Image (cartoon, rainbow, N blue to C red):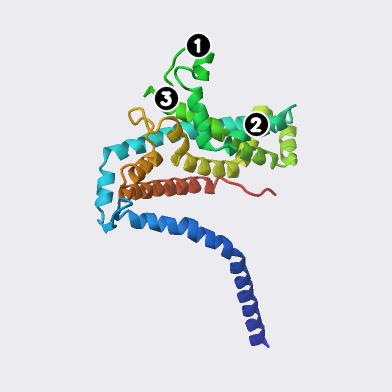
Amino acid sequence: MAGSGVARRGAIRRRNALTGYSLLAPSLFGVVCFLLLPVLVVVWLSFQSWDLIGPISYVGLDNYRSVLTDGVFGNSLLVTLVFVALVVPIQTAIGLWAATLLTRGLPGSAWFRTIYVLPWIAAPLALGVVWKWILAPTDGALNTLIGQRIEWLSDPSLALPSVAAVVIWTNVGYVTLFFMAGLLNIPDQVLEAARIDGAGGMSLFWQIKLPLLRPTMFFVLVTTVISAFQVFDQVYALTQGGPARTTDVVAARIYYEAFSAFDLGRAAVMAVVLLVILVTITLAQQLYFRRRVTYEME
């Protein structure tokens, strides 16, 4: 009897496992075909020399030596790091501030929620074209408004901050949306108890709301850092990496190496380096937030 019970439980577990894997199969197929397989192809290409036309030849670590000792790629990494340092903190702070206002139930909040999200759901390349007209030095809307000619996109000291401002404007609705969801998920009983204990507006935000927003903060920071490191559309539309490579971010450099210089091997190495950087930063963020995040409340 005992043996038959164990066998029956084992059969149930196997059947449940088979059902689970069957339900996961469509997602696993997508992950393998559209995520894992492309990554493996890029890693394989990083050891090859190919110009998209001629035959592929194996070159070993030559591409890695070429890229890692290339000052142009080093400049792209530095530009990207500066860009991320500009974009992520500012858009996170603005998104959190906007979410705090929009969750207070003020008149017109529903309209502002829609307006904030519109730039994020629009095509980045199209927005880049519009902003290139706005920031044009001669007939641009911004210079016309302020009555002064400023080379927003051709001045090396202004080009990267200008691109960063466009990206922040585009993505702040995304950040606001998730912070709003996090704020609305905080139980009213917790906030009411804090108010009874004497917590005011600022102390309520810093000591109650912000700690409870850590799961949302973790998600927002991970996704926005990845997005900022991979920015391409706005850079391509606004500056194409100029002037003097001051906006030559890594994604733009990869595009140039692959489709202008026709060197798929070097482009693949740059993509692998970018992947390693993103995985490292994501793991560091996960380790930092792991003991500081509370997902459930009693």
Residue 24 - label: none
In the rendered view, does 233 fall on the left or right side of 119? Answer: left
Q: Residue furthest front?
A: 53
Q: Residue at x 50, y 11 (%)?
A: 147
Is disc 1 placed on a helix, strand or loop?
A: loop
Percent coordinates x, y for residue 146 in the rendering: 52, 13
Residue 115 - label: 2
Percent coordinates x, y for residue 33 in the rendering: 49, 60
Marked residue nearer the N-terminal end (3 or 2): 2
The alpha-carbon separation of the residues under discs 3 and 1 comes to: 17 Å
Q: Residue furthest bottom?
A: 1
The amino acid sitting under disc 2 is Ile
Image: 139 above or below 15: above
- Classify residue 260 by image quadrant: top left
Percent coordinates x, y for residue 66 in the rendering: 25, 46
Q: Residue furthest top?
A: 147
The alpha-carbon separation of the residues under discs 3 and 2 comes to: 26 Å
Determine which residue is flagged by label 1.
147
Tell me the mark number nearer the camera, choosing from 2 and 1. 1
Residue 153 - label: 3
- Classify residue 21 by image quadrant: bottom right
**Is residue 213 among the parts visible in the rendering?**
yes
Sort mark 1 into few (<14), some (14-19) or many (20+) by Cα contacts within 10 Å: few
Is disc 3 placed on a helix, strand or loop?
A: loop
Is disc 2 placed on a helix, strand or loop?
A: helix
Percent coordinates x, y for residue 62 in the rendering: 24, 52
Marked residue nearer the N-terminal end (2 or 1): 2
